[in-house]
Amino acid sequence: MVRCFERYDHAQSLIGMIAFTENMELTEPMLRSFLKIKQEFDKFEKGLFNELFVTDLIANEYISYYGKKKLRALSEGLEEAFDRQSINRLLDGVKTIADEERLYRQSYRLLKKALKKKYRSYLDIVGSTEDLKPYILKILKANGIAELPENLIEKILLDLRKEFFYVHNILPVIKSGLGTELRDDFLKNSGLDKGYIEELESEYLTDQEREKMTGGDNFLF
C-alpha cells in the first residue's frame, strides 16, 4: 500500500510539472517510470491511470493550451508504448510540442511588442495574414528566428487578435462597471489561457476593479 502511494505521489508530481512547466525536459527514464506506474494502476482498473492523473488535470482551467496538448500526447502515447522504439517515439512527440511551445511564446512576445508599436488599433491587424506576413518575418528574423511554420504564424496572429480585442472592447466595459458576462463568455470561447488573461487584467485594471470584475478609457495596448 505504501509503495502504491509513493508511485501515486511520484506520478502526480511529474505529470504536474509536464502540464505547468514550459521548459521541463522529459526524459526516457521519466517515460519508463510513467509506463510502469500506468501498468500498475491499470491492473486495478483499466483506464485508472488516466482517470487519476490526466482527465481532471486536462479539465483544469489554468492548464495552458500547450500543457493540455502535452498531456494528451503523453496519455495517448503511453497506451501504445511497450518497447524502447515506441517510448522514444512518444518522447519525440512530446518534445516536438514543447519546442513549439517555446517558439510560440518567444515569437508571440516579439510580435505583440512590434505590432503594438507599429499599429494604433487592433483593427489594423484584423486584415489578411499575407498582408502582415512580410513585416512579421522581418521582425522574427531580426530577433534570430529564421523560420516559423505557417500554422504557427496563423495561431499567433489569431491569438494576438483575440487579445487585442479583449483589451480594446471588453476591458473598457468591465472598467466602466459592466461586462462580467462578456468576460465569462470570452474566457469560455476564446481559447486563450486563463492565466494569461488574468495577467492582462492585472496590467489594465486596479485591484478593486479586478476584485469586482465590474467597472472607460480606451486602452491602447
Image: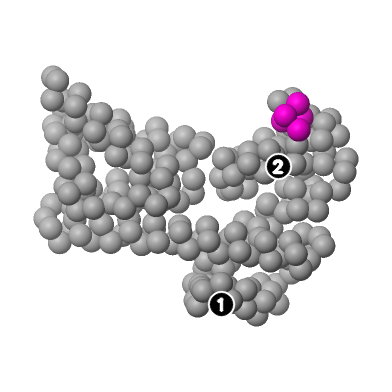
Which of the 4 quarters of the picture holds residue 189? top right
> Quick one: label 2, few (<14), some, or many (20+) residues within 10 Å?
few
Quadrant housing the N terminus: top left
Q: Is residue 208 magenta?
A: yes
Q: Which residue is mark 2?
A: 203
The answer to whether the residue labelled 2 contacts the one labelled 1, judged by CB atoms less than 8 Å apart, is no
Question: Is 188 in front, or is 26?
Answer: 26
| Side of 120 where 149 appears, left or right | left
Q: Which mark is residue 104?
A: none
Report the span colored magenta. 206-210
Tally of numbered tags = 2
Mark 2 → mark 1, Cα distance in angstroms = 29 Å
Q: Amino acid at mark 2?
A: Glu
| Side of 183 where 120 appears, left or right | right
Q: Is residue 175 magenta?
A: no
Q: Is residue 76 something that shows in the picture? A: yes
Percent of width and height locating residue 68: 42, 46
Give SS at disc 1. helix
Q: Which residue is at 80% across, 53% downward?
A: 220
Q: Which residue is at 30% across, 34% downward?
A: 13
Give SS at disc 2. helix
Residue 193 to residue 207: above or below: below
> Quick one: label 1, few (<14), some, or many (20+) residues within 10 Å?
few
Q: Is residue 189 something that shows in the picture? A: no
Residue 103 to residue 15: above or below: below
Q: Which residue is mark 1?
A: 141
